[in-house]
Amino acid sequence: MTYELTDDPLVLGGKTFRSRLIVGTGKYSNFAVMREALERSGSQIVTVAVRRVNLSDRSRESLLDFIDTNRFMLLPNTAGCYTADEAVRAANLGREAGLSDWVKLEVIGDERTLFPDTEALLAATRVLVKDGFVVLPYTNDDPIMARKLEDAGATAVMPLGAPIGSGMGIQNPANLRIIMECVSVPVIVDAGVGTASDAAVAMELGCDAVLMNTGIAGATDPVTMAEAMKKAVEAGRLAFKAGRIAKKLYASASSPLEGVSR
């Protein structure tokens, strides 16, 4: 039976999505480019930093004016928060402003590396889950922390592939494999994707989705890169479902001679 992507939706928080690519809305040269890149990405979920949205004066131009909310689900994020309290406050501001009761939870522990403060992240996850949020926490590639976040009620875990905005690609594929064995919630690679092959690798490993921003927005041609990322995620998922051949030390002829008379 032929495998079809349409028969393999991403299920998050009880909702079903055709696309397994989640894209961010920061770092674009202008809102018009952002809008076109979102369209070409085929994504159905876009992240929006609560701190970048003008919640007090909706009459002023905002990035929300360039996002078709009938097509894209907003996923507010707590980018720029360095404590659990800050992150919880930002999530509640987004919900009160009508953005969503979903949150991509970020609690940064170091300004230079932007690595997450996992202790504070876990604390914020517990508070927000108790308050009725659908929580998707950005974390490091630590299987133990991934399991703790699931136990705290996280809807998915989002381990980094590499530092935010680094474009270094998947640095620890073994850790991602172990995380997928340790948790039963979806695993979404978040951060570090630089080009289409990075996204394909994440999906070939068996990750459920990929979230990216800089890899698209920072490209020379963000709109074309958005389409490349869309196709890479789809190709990686197809390859994972198809099942790759085993790696071997020596060659194996593609046209075997066994049973052929010479």
Image (spheres, helix red, strand yellow):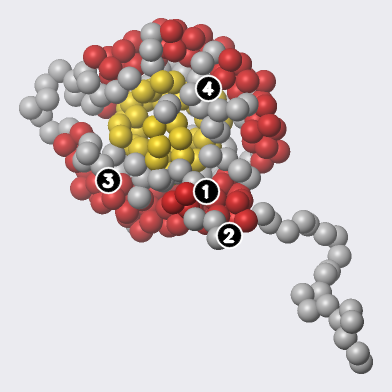
Three-letter residue code for mark 4: Pro
From the image, tell me which residue sits under label 4: 116
Give whichever of discs 3 and 4 has the lower sequence position: 3
Question: Which type of secondary structure does the marked residue at label 2 adopt?
Answer: loop
Label 2 sits on residue: 1
Tell me if 74 is positioned left or right of 56 in this view. right
Three-letter code, disc 3 = Met
Say whether residue 239 is visible: yes
Could you classify mark 1 by the number of other residues whose Cα lies within 10 Å: few (under 14), some (14-19), or many (20 or more)?
many
Compared with residue 245, is residue 131 higher up or lower down, i.e. above or below? Answer: above
Label annotation for residue 199: 1
Residue 34 is marked as 3
91 or 111, which is in the foreground? 91
Disc 1 element: helix
- Residue drawn at (33%, 20%) of the image: 101
Q: Nearer the viewer, residue 136 or 51?
A: 136
Work out whether mark 2 precedes mark 4 in sequence or the reverse, and give the earlier one.
2
With 38 as the anchor, is 150 left or right in this view? right
